[in-house]
Image (cartoon, grey):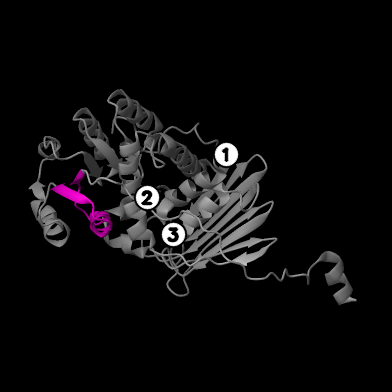
Amino acid sequence: MSEQLEDDYGLSKVEQTIAIAAPQLDYKPPIPNSRPGIGLIGCGGIAAQHLTAYRHAGFRVVALCDKTEAKAEDRRQRFAPDAAIYTEYRELLKRDDVEIVDITTYPIPRVAIIEDALRAGKHVLSQKPFVVDLDVGERLVELADQHGLKLAVNQNGRWAPHFAYMRQAVAAGLVGDLGSVHISINWDHSWIADTSFNDVHDLLLYDFTIHWFDMVTCLFGDRQPTGVYAAIQQATSQRAKPPMLGGAVITYAGGQAVLSLNATVVHGQQDQTFVAGSQGSLLSIGPSLSEQTVTLFTAAGHATPALEGTWFREGFQGTMAELICAIEQNREPLNSARANLRSLALTLAAVASTRDGIVRVPGTVRRLPEYHSDS
């Protein structure tokens, strides 16, 4: 009787598919023809990831700037021995051989630096999160347009090998009409307890999960989210101050995305993304951001591509490479600030939802709580 019920309800009908060759998709970072001079402003911890990726790609870093000269000197010795050192960013902006400025400082002070860089005639790659205020972000986009310059955002997850492959697969129609995205991330983010990030209450969603809000935005393409509900809370075992547990539900017409976050997992960490469409699905799973196995399921069978690269190296390489290619081809970069405002609007709405416990519509929340446009 139980076997009959299983057959009637399809409970025992686990799809047995054959292994097929994985579709060849252009998931790797683009390769620019030129090597314009790059000036990096802000030589803190994340700068090492930028410079590691640029060295691997053969990009040309000609200047480094940090208020603390020792930090800039350390980065020069480790990554760019021929680069000039500055403690005042405006001096770096005077260099004719600096064509692109990579700005890695915190969001609030970064606004003035972006403005000055654009007025100095430099293309800009801004660290994420781009801004804390959508109105400010729109003003910076307009300023770049007025000067005929490219303004891009370092949403490096777009070129993480596993996500880049899934992004390309969805765009190519391999899973049909996208219905849902489920993301479950279980990792240990307790390192922030010993840094200034420990004082950022909304760190989980605004600083970290913005990568996944951006991924969801990319996957759903032109479809606009109709609402987002999010919640965060403290874990009993956490060492850091900001809430380390969270989740979000994002609704679209005919679709949804669900995110589940636990940033206190020490053992058995797992990062999983499942994408379901009308003609197939994608699963990416692994113990970390850079250790992921992707499988594509369709009526023809299942395919597991052999992906090359890591999130940090290819991700950071991809954001700069795409900006350089956009400059060469005089087009909008895939990671343009204008496009990134959609991901940021979703992020800000999610943060606002954690405050009042109601569904928020992306775009109606203009700034991060506790921040103002003139901060």
Q: Which percent across, then down, holds residue 225? A: 57, 39
User: What whole-number distance in Å separates the C-alpha atoms at marks 3 and 2?
Assistant: 13 Å
Compared to residue 137, the image places residue 172 above or below, namely below
Query: For mark 1, what is the residue?
Result: 225
Which of discs 3 and 1 lies nearer the camera? The answer is 3
User: What whole-number distance in Å separates the C-alpha atoms at marks 3 and 1?
Assistant: 25 Å
Residue 289 painted magenta: no
Q: Residue at x 42, y 63 (%)?
A: 289
Q: Which percent across, then down, holds residue 354? A: 50, 46
- In magenta, the rendered stretch is 37-64
Considering every residue shown, the one lying at the far top of the view is 146
Query: For mark 2, what is the residue?
Result: 30
User: What whole-number distance in Å separates the C-alpha atoms at marks 2 and 1?
Assistant: 29 Å
User: If the image is split into quadrants, where does the N terminus sit?
Assistant: bottom right
Tag 3, which secondary structure?
Answer: helix
Q: Is residue 311 left or right of residue 215?
A: left
CB contact under 8 Å: marks 3 and 1: no
- Mark with earlier residue (3, 2): 2
Q: Residue at x 69, y 51 (%)?
A: 278
Compared to residue 65, the image places residue 262 above or below, namely below
Compared to residue 318, the image places residue 343 above or below, namely above
Residue 61 painted magenta: yes
Q: Residues within 10 Å of mark 3 (few under 14, many from 20)?
A: many
Q: Residue at x 54, y 47 (%)?
A: 219
